[in-house]
Image (spheres, rainbow, N blue to C red):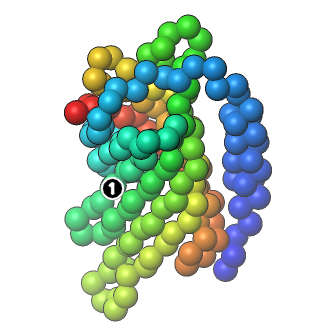
Amino acid sequence: MVKTPSRFLLAGLLAAGIFFSIPNIAFAQRPDGVGIGIQLGRPSGLSLNLPTNGRASIDLLAAWDLDDFFFLNGHALFQQSIGSDPQLGLFYGPGAFIGVRDRGRWEFSDEVYAGISGTIGLNYFIDRFEIYLRATLRLQLIDETDGGAGGGLGLRYFF
C-alpha cells in the first residue's frame, strides 16, 4: 500500500527553500580532520564526519540492534556561522538512507528499506569537540513509499 507523504514532502521543500536562501556569509569553524562520536535520539548510534575538498563534509550515522535491524544514513553537510560567533553554526544537507530489519525467526527474508533524506541542525564547537542538535526528514522509496522524521543530540571529537 502506498501512503501519501505530502505533508512531509511539503515541510521538507519549505525547509529547504528557507535554509538554502540564507546567505553564505561566514562558515562555521569546523576543526580539521575526521569527527567521530555518538548521537542519542531517533535513531541512536555512531556518528562519523569526514572532510572533503569542497564546501560540504560527509556525515554518516550508523545505528543497529544486534538482533533486529541495521540503519545507515548519510548526508552532505553544508555549514555556516550564525551571528558573530564563529563557533555556533547552522548545518543542512541532502542525503540518503538504507535499513535492514530482521523479519523474525520464522521468516525467510529480511525487510530492506531505503530512501532520501534531508537534515538540518545547530552545532557548537569547543576546541576539537562538536555538540549538535539535528532534525532529519526521510522519504522512504523502497519497499513502500512513506515519510518519517528523526533526529537527535550528538557529540563528536575531531582527530
Q: Secondary structure at mark 1?
A: strand
Q: Is residue 98 above or below residue 39?
A: below
Would you say residue 135 is visible in this rendering? no
For the residue marked with disc 1, what is the amino acid? Ala
Residue drawn at x 75%, y 40% as measured from the top left? 17
Residue 11, image x, y percentages: 73, 46
Would you say residue 86 is visible in this rendering? yes
Q: Quadrant of the N terminus?
A: bottom right
Identity of the residue furthest to the front in this view: 53
Q: Is residue 115 above or below residue 133?
A: below
Of 58 and 148, the residue lying toward us: 58
Q: Which residue is mark 1?
A: 63
State the image quarter where residue 6 is shown.
bottom right
Identity of the residue furthest to the bottom in this view: 108
Residue drawn at x 44%, y 56% as measured from the top left? 73
State the image quarter where residue 135 is shown.
top right
State the image quarter where residue 92 is shown.
top right
Residue 80 shown left or right of residue 158 in the figure: right
Residue 131, image x, y percentages: 37, 26
Residue 79 shown left or right of residue 34 in the figure: right
